[in-house]
Image (cartoon, rainbow, N blue to C red):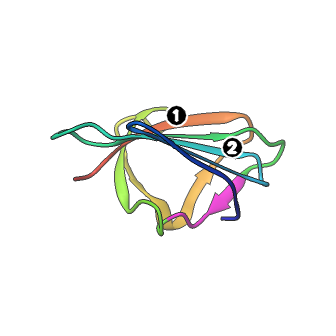
């Protein structure tokens, strides 16, 4: 992932890259971290973002309720998914 934007605002970390991928990470004290991953591009993406996150559970998107691993993360064009990360 090539980072072009990497900003921290309080408990929110915002990342974006040249592939039109937007990642918003919210941390909460004593609770699971929530991550929003959005593909703003016109093509489907298959990424390895395991350097940022390992696993979690989809809470919003077509795979709601299923386990998510970030080593082979797939996201369709113009899609947003929300993942609650494992502690």
Query: x, y (%) of residue 79?
Result: 65, 35
Exactly how many numbered labels are in the figure? 2
Magenta stretch: includes residue 64: no
- Pinpoint residue 76: horizontal percent, then vertical percent: 68, 43
Percent position (x, y) of residue 24? Answer: 52, 40
In the current view of this chain or complex, which residue is farthest to the top? 60
In this orientation, which residue lies closer to the viewer: 33 or 55? 33
Name the residue at 33% across, 41% down: 27
**Label whose residue precedes the other's in the sequence (1 or 2):** 1
Magenta stretch: helix, strand or loop mostly: strand
Q: In the image, is residue 64 above or below residue 1?
A: above
Q: Which residue is mark 2?
A: 76
Q: Which secondary structure lies at badge 1? A: loop
Which quadrant, please, contains the N terminus? bottom right
Which residue is under mark 1?
A: 62
Quadrant of the rendered image containing residue 22: top right
Give the SS element for disc 2.
Answer: loop
Residue at the spot 84% in from the left edge and 42% down from the top edge: 42
Left/right placement of residue 14 relative to residue 45 reads left
Q: CA distance from mark 1 to mark 2?
A: 10 Å
Q: Is residue 73 above or below residue 83?
A: below
Magenta range is 45-49
User: Is residue 70 toward the left or the right of residue 74 in the image?
Assistant: left
Q: Residue furthest left?
A: 30
Position of residue 21 relative to residue 38, above or below, is: below
| 43 sits to left or right of 23 | right
Left or right: 11, with 79 as reference point:
left
> Does the magenta run of residues contain 48?
yes
Q: Residue at x 48, y 69 (%)?
A: 51
């Amino acid at each position: 992932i090539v980072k072009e934007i990497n900003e921290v605002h309080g408990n929110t970390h915002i990342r974006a890259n040249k592939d039109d991928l937007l990642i918003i990470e919210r941390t909460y004290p004593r609770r699971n971290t929530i991550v929003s991953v959005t593909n703003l591009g016109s093509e489907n993406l298959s990424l390895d973002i395991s350097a940022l996150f390992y696993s979690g559970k989809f809470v919003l998107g077509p795979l709601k309720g299923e386990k998510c691993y970030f080593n082979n993360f797939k996201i369709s064009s113009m899609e947003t998914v929300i993942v609650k990360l494992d502690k």
